[in-house]
């Protein structure tokens, strides 16, 4: 589970018995002044100090736990972005104030401000249990998200799912066979869902998804460049050095003699990317890496992050300024 998916602890105003039933009667929050706890739903709170530091993925997982403790769950499962968060997939610019559930049978329960129920088929093979929560399987989750989310959120989730099944961090290699086997599972669902909501978008996203993207920003960059008519880049393009080392470039256009890096905030804040280094050391390593690639290839390098991507239109302007469009 990634740092982005870390969730907060639920603080119960009504303590629960081991069987999940409420003991009854509200109890005070010992030693907590007003404003130090945030209400998620009736009887469920989190420490504000924890909640404010969560990413959207962590907030969705926390809400799912709060909802699961108070609802009938035998014939239901969390789905869409809530399931994506539980699988450790990124939730790109999607709301985190409610969770979606599939309810296979008729229910008298109504949607609430923090939960939306969808009455849809839910075969047993479409359900897995993660941290005690019933959620849709990885391929079902991807299928649901790429039909119902924005194209940007859809490609971020699909790329990350492919990376989860096909990327080897130790060897820094991508297993195309594993990736395509997973894509086949999603494509089979798309074929069976002909005519369903969002199927046209799902087909498009499934065709362009690529697990070599390391971060959501890389996924969205690739999507927007495609939509803007930029030549398709080669992803994680390998450059070998004379000392036996190598680097992988986020986006490369060998025929154009240029490459591009997405420098997301995660590379300067999250332990899995920093590897025990300080921010200054990370930046110094980036500069050295760029110079070594330039010495070997002679190519031009352009760098960008989310500051260049507040909107599709502003990213298009940026590409024009670096003459890549």
Image (spheres, grey):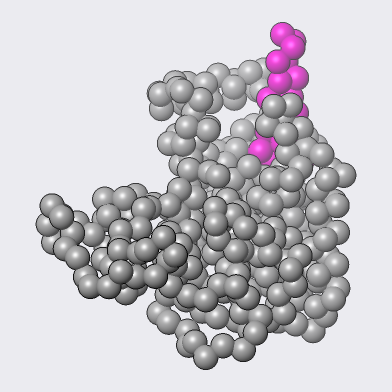
Q: Position of residue 236 (x, y in %)?
A: 72, 36
Residue at 76% in and 32% down: 173
| Quarter holding residue 312 | bottom right
103 vs 157: above or below: below
Between residue 22 and residue 84, name the one nearer to us.
Answer: 22
Observer able to see residue 65? yes
Position of 107 with respect to 186 (left or right) is left
Between residue 28 and residue 277, name the one nearer to us.
Answer: 28
Position of 279 with respect to 94 (left or right) is left
Q: Which residues are magenta?
A: 234-252
User: Count the marks: how many?
Assistant: 0
Q: Is residue 238 magenta?
A: yes
The N terminus: image quadrant: top right
Q: Position of residue 93 (x, y in %)?
A: 49, 62
| Quarter holding residue 10 | bottom left
Q: Position of residue 27 (x, y in %)?
A: 19, 65
Between residue 109 and residue 324, name the one nearer to us.
Answer: 109
Query: Secondary structure of the magenta portion, mostly?
Result: strand
137 vs 172: above or below: below
Residue at 68% in and 64% down: 127
Residue at 60% in and 63% down: 134
The residue positioned farthest toward the top in the image shown: 243
Q: Is residue 237 magenta?
A: yes
Residue at 13% in and 61% down: 34
Position of 82 with respect to 194 (left or right) is left
Q: Position of residue 279 (x, y in %)?
A: 41, 27
Observer able to see residue 253? no
214 vs 238: above or below: below
Position of 53 with respect to 256 (left or right) is left
């Amino acid at each position: 589970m990634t740092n982005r998916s870390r969730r907060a602890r639920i603080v119960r105003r009504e303590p629960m018995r081991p069987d999940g039933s409420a003991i009854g009667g509200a109890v005070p929050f010992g030693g907590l002044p007003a404003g130090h706890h945030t209400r998620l739903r009736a009887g469920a709170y989190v420490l504000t100090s924890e909640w404010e530091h969560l990413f959207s993925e962590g907030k969705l997982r926390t809400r799912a736990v709060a909802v699961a403790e108070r609802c009938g769950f035998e014939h239901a499962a969390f789905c869409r972005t809530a399931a994506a968060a539980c699988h450790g997939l990124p939730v790109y610019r999607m709301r985190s104030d409610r969770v979606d559930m599939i309810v296979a049978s008729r229910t008298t329960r109504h949607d609430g401000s923090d939960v939306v129920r969808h009455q849809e088929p839910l075969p047993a093979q479409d359900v897995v249990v993660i941290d005690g929560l019933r959620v849709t399987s990885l391929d079902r989750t991807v299928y649901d998200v790429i039909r119902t989310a924005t194209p940007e959120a859809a490609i971020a989730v699909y790329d990350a799912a492919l990376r989860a099944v096909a990327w080897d961090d130790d060897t820094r290699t991508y297993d195309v066979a594993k990736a395509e086997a997973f894509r086949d599972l999603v494509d089979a669902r798309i074929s069976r869902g002909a005519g369903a909501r969002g199927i046209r978008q799902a087909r498009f996203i499934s065709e362009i998804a690529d697990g070599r993207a390391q971060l959501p920003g890389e996924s969205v960059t690739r999507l927007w460049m495609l939509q803007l008519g930029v030549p398709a880049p080669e992803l994680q393009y390998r450059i070998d050095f004379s000392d036996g080392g190598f680097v992988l470039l986020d986006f490369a256009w060998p025929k154009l003699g240029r490459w591009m890096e997405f420098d997301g905030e995660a590379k300067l804040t999250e332990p899995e990317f920093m590897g025990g280094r300080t921010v200054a050391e990370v930046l110094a390593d980036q500069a050295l890496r760029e110079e070594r690639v330039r010495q070997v290839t002679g190519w031009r390098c352009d760098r960008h992050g989310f500051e260049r991507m507040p909107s599709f239109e502003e990213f298009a302007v940026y590409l024009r300024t670096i003459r890549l469009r």
